[in-house]
Image: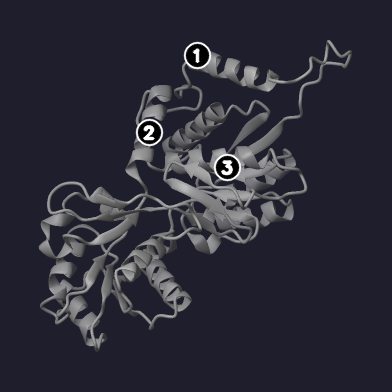
Amino acid sequence: MSLLSRPRLPRRTSVILTALVGLAGCGQQASPIASGQPLQEPPRSRIALLLPLSGPQAPLGTAMEQAAELALFERGNRNVDFLPMDTGGTTSGAAEAARRAASAGARVIVGPLTAAETSAASSPARAARIPIIAFTNDSAQAGPGVWTLGVTPAQQVRRVMGAAQSGGARRFGLVAPDDAFGRALAAAMRTEASTWSLTDPVIVLHAARASAGSVAQDLASRSQGGLDAVMIGSSGAAARAIAAALGPAGLTEPAPRILGHALWAQDSGMGQEVALQGALFAAPDPRSRARFDARYEGAFGERPPRLAGVAYDAAGVAARVVLTPRGQTGPSTGEVFDGVDGPIRLQPDGVVQRGLALFAVEAMGEPRMMEPAPQPGGAGS
């Protein structure tokens, strides 16, 4: 789908929203004409959108641009201009797009898509003192002036380990594939255990094709004295097989509480394995996502891809940032933003605090929400 032919907000919706924005700007203000002052248009702020608008990821880039436009319409900020800039889905394209954003006078950069692109765009953006609100969930890219808005492994681990601790868990273990996601889970579990003065967690990172029995046996052999809770970093059939193998490997009396991650929310078959029934995991509240999906489909006539929600949140945060004085180079870090994937708060060091809901795997059907998403930074987040 080309940029010229992509769906836009229906004309009637645009007219109504524009009228409402105009009315909101008129409330309790003296007329410049009546007061003898010259009629002046308020200064406009520019937000650069770094997106893959060409190449294999172009359809996703277009959908994310539309989500950003929807955020601007719904927030009614008529003094903001979006500057879509094509990264081509490459690191060199992202770096060049960041330089063009600086030349164009952008106050904030929204995007780019991946961790590698974010790393490439960060240097020219920091040189120009332009904050970046990126879409990646790789928290290693975060730092002063750069925020990563994807749901991170660390956010999920913090939430579900906190819930397990509330139930009495003190000794934690992790079995996960030895890949980027598994290593991120392991780093997050070690950090949380240290923060809470717990014993070092038992970490088993395994090859992708390792048998469930050997993985479970490896964990059990390293866990003298047993474990209170075990996080499984796999999904689908692999996670079910590992959960079933924990008991025969010797992790019993009592059996450890099984913990999971947000990808389990997309698999209604997890409860087919008895050992996983009642397992806990943290994920965004699907009700907020469903409301966004409905609004997006009503505006553009198509269902949004999942990453469109991250673009909507990033654009909404950026639109608030440009309302701050120019001396402030980032979001108001005390403010909680209601996002598609839950409430978020951005910290000065680039850390994004996120409220995630807590779910339990059910024997049949969808997982059951045990606790709604708390406010970021509060108890349970």
- The answer to whether 371 appears left or right of 78 in the picture is left
* Pointer 2 with pointer 3, Cβ within 8 A: no
Q: Residues within 10 Å of mark 2 (few under 14, many from 20)?
A: few
Numbered label attached to residue 21: none
Colouring scheme, one of rainbow, by chain, secondary structure, one colour: one colour
Q: Which residue is mark 2?
A: 291
- Tell me: residue 24, above or below residue 179: above
- The answer to whether 338 appears left or right of 238 in the picture is right
Q: Nearer the viewer, mark 1 or mark 3?
A: 3
Number of marks in picture: 3
- The answer to whether 28 appears left or right of 118 in the picture is right
* Pointer 1 with pointer 3, Cβ within 8 A: no
Looking at the picture, tell me which residue is in the foreground, 145 or 193.
Answer: 193
Q: Marks 2 and 3, how far apart in space?
A: 18 Å
Q: Residue at the location (66% across, 31% down)?
A: 80
Looking at the picture, tell me which residue is in the foreground, 260 or 95.
Answer: 260
Whether residue 304 can be seen here = yes
Residue 61 at x, y = what percent?
47, 38
Q: Residue at the location (38% across, 83% down)?
A: 199
Q: Which residue is mark 3?
A: 317
- Circle 2 sits in a helix, a strand or a loop, which is it? helix
Give whichever of discs 1 and 3 has the lower sequence position.
1
Q: Which residue is mark 1?
A: 11
